[in-house]
Image (spheres, rainbow, N blue to C red):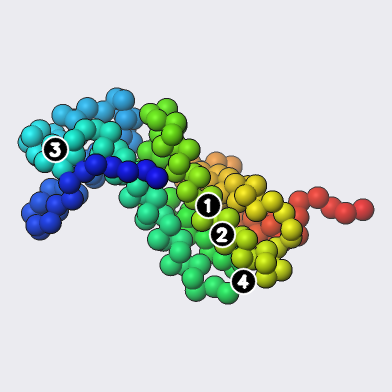
Amino acid sequence: MIESDIKIPTTRNAITTFNMIIEAALEKFYEGGYHGTTIQAITQHAGVAAGTFYLYFPSKMSLYKHILITLSHNIRKEIASKVALKETRLEKEREGIKAFVQYVQQNPQMYNVIWESLYIDRGLFKEYYESFARRYVKGLSHAQAQGEIDTLDVEVTAYVLMGITNFIGLKVLLDLGENNEDLEHIIDSVMMLLERGLFTRK
């Protein structure tokens, strides 16, 4: 489990300052990467004294871990709130992909922060995606027990679906290929693939 040894503020002013540091860090990590960003650059961008940083974060790594945890929580929360309204696994997959892509559009820096963890601390990267996969496996296992999906290896299936969702998000965010303005068309194509399969049967 990813853990961050930070001090969570409780007063209104402290919470505001805390959030200013996080927002500044997100911007600086997005621009220059983790290793290319100093604590001084973060505090200057946030408009706070250098010493203020250490009231909440023991180190740049603790701040980074907190951001990674927050992104993970927010993505899961966003997806969960949308898929909860749907009944079938197929409907849940569609809403989950759509919710993820829309979150990506609103938070373009997330890929930089998440994927850079592979080079900062491979264990962080591994735990981040394994934790997503574990939750995905639970949902797929339930759907499999209900006869909604084939008797496949649910862990492999979870990673396949995560991979699809990740790269559809990149397609839209980075404007890869064509028709990225039509999100419904993109998701329709993904769902057709999932529902019908890729290869024709002769």
Mark toward the viewer: 4 or 1: 1
**Mark 4 and mark 1: Cα distance apart in space:** 20 Å
Q: What residue type is labelled 2?
A: Lys
Residue linked to disc 1: 134
Return the disc, 1 or 3, that comes first in the chain's sequence: 3
Does the CB distance between marks 4 and 2 fall below 8 Å? Answer: no
- Asked if the residue at tag 1 contacts the one at tag 2, i.e. Cβ–Cβ closer than 8 Å, the answer is yes
Residue beneath label 4, please?
88
Q: Residue at x 29, y 25 (%)?
A: 36
Give the spatial CA distance, label 3 vs label 2. Answer: 39 Å
Residue in the foreground of this view, choosing between 175 and 18: 18
Does 86 sit left or right of 3 as displayed? Answer: right
Q: Could you tell me residue 39's position as x and y percent?
A: 19, 30
Mark closest to the chain's N terminus, 3 or 2: 3
Label 2 secondary element: helix
Mark 2, residues whose alpha carbon is within 10 Å: few (<14), some, or many (≥20)?
A: some
Label 1, secondary structure: give it: helix
Nearer to us of marks 1 and 3 is 1
Q: Are marks 3 and 4 in contact (CB under 8 Å)?
A: no
